Amino acid sequence: MDRDTASPRMPRLALLGASKSFGQVRALIDGNLELMPGEVHALLGENGAGKSTLVKILAGVHAPDSGELKVDGVARRFSSPADARDAGIAVIYQEPTLFFDLSIAENIYMGRQPVDRIGRIDYETMHREVADLLESLGVDLKPRQLVRGLSIADQQVIEIAKALSLNANVLIMDEPTAALSLPEVERLFAIVRALRERGAAILFITHRLEEVFALTQHVTIMRDGAKVCDAPTTEMTTAALVAKMVGRDLETFYPKAEVVPGEIKLSVRGLTRTGVFKDISFDVRAGEIVALAGLVGAGRSEVARAIFGIDRPDAGEVRVAGRRLAPGRPALAVKAGLAMVPEDRRQQGLALELSIARNASMTVLGRLTRFGLISGAREAALARDWGARLRLKAGDMGAAVGTLSGGNQQKVVLGKWLATGPQVLIIDEPTRGIDVGAKAEVYAALSDLVREGMAVLMISSEMPEVLGMADRVLVMHEGRISAEIDRAHASEQRIMSAALGQADIHLGQAA
């Protein structure tokens, strides 16, 4: 359905026929978007589809080469973010940009603090107005609190309060849930719904398709710099969204290989770290994907770190292919055939300023070195081989890995560890922050690996991912495994019940 026939109401914001090029690169070819009052509008597309460029035009960061922008029916042209802010447009980024050593109130009113008759900052008025804003959002935050130490979720609430203090009626939320726990996501959704009821127009950018159906009323999908779909959310399905975004039908988004599990490759017994997790025991077999699920803070990543040897456990043992690992010794774990792809690939998995080839070969440089010199040809060949296998989209292996999209960065981290020839792969949040097409390719790579006999321990907060890829699900609650559920019995309800500690569930055969 075309938006101009969908409703007689005037859009809060309308972008018509916008284009933007950077040199020879056409980032936006035909940008079209209408945001209606009282509506949450999803903007979807793979990385490189043009979403970021479109958002930066709306935020006043970039001026379009052509096209028209209207706010409440009035044509506008922004030359700076301040122009967009003055027009009532606010952008809430995935990682808020606040001053940590200032209070919440000082952050909200930065540069425009109310003053008294002699020009001094009127803190009483400022604190009262901020308290009213925070109360209206239903959050337990105080105006005088320092920002330092607050969660990402609370920082996003501060950004929303700042937007409301500026009388913004268009809010652009760019991947706001990527770093949030489930309760924090639910609180954010409640705030967004309240803003919608006040008549705000909200543009919601996400890679999590379940959020589209839970929160939004309309969907715009972009591909290759242009709008390819514009429809009410109720008219869409997950399969249709995926097909529109990637330009092809994905016969199976979760290409789980049907493999008969083999011998035990990873055995964990009685693993305990005081105050973090206790008595963790499980096995992972060759050809099997075991998911470690649970709420943020349940101890999933901490268990993985202890298995790999980053953190030293207080009790318990880990064996890889029957060989007991020395605790707290990651280098020995790698030699034994264990590999770990961390959750934060940018901080822990990659050296962003180094080349793709160097990052891909970093774990095996000893094999590429002769007489103390690294063979550039062998390094490049290794990177090309793994790049081809993982469908890496990169023209030049000598380019900095920081120039790649999130999905391609994840493939480089995966290739780096697969180059060590592991028997067991631990992968923490394998598709966080990457687009739907890249997700499908990562799932295909994992499916290939288990088909070849690798054992995979996957930590994931995304329920569809867990249900789609795991042979068994181990659910953690407050540092313990509260449930073990096989693929045939796994459901969102059972997993969430166990994650909340409501029941001990053991369905299916234990490994």
Image (cartoon, rainbow, N blue to C red):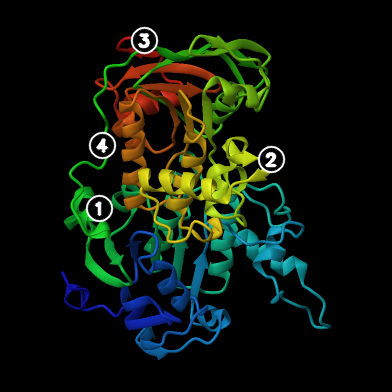
In the rendered image, the quadrant that contains the C terminus is top left
Give the structural element (helix, strand or loop) at label 1: helix
Residue drawn 61% across the image and 10% down it? 316
From mark 4 to mark 1, how far is it between C-alphas? 14 Å
Residue drawn 40% across the image and 73% down it? 54
Give the structural element (helix, strand or loop) at label 2: loop
Category of crowding for the residue at label 2, using alpha-carbon neighbours closer than 10 angstroms: few (below 14), some (14–19), many (at least 20):
few
Position of residue 346 in the picture relative to residue 51 (left or right) = right
Tell me which amino acid carries mark 2: Phe
CB-based contact (under 8 Å), mark 3 and mark 2: no
Q: Which residue is mark 2?
A: 371
Give the structural element (helix, strand or loop) at label 4: loop
Mark closer to the chain start, 3 or 1: 1
Q: Which residue is mark 4?
A: 255
Tell me which amino acid carries mark 3: Ala
From mark 3 to mark 1, how far is it between C-alphas? 34 Å
Mark closer to the chain start, 1 or 2: 1
| Looking at the image, residue 304 lies above or below residue 371 | above
From mark 2 to mark 4, how far is it between C-alphas? 44 Å
> 265 or 360, which is in the foreground?
360
Which of the numbered marks, if any, corresponds to residue 242? 1
Q: How many numbered discs, if any?
A: 4
Can residue 443 be seen here?
yes
Mark closer to the chain start, 3 or 4: 4
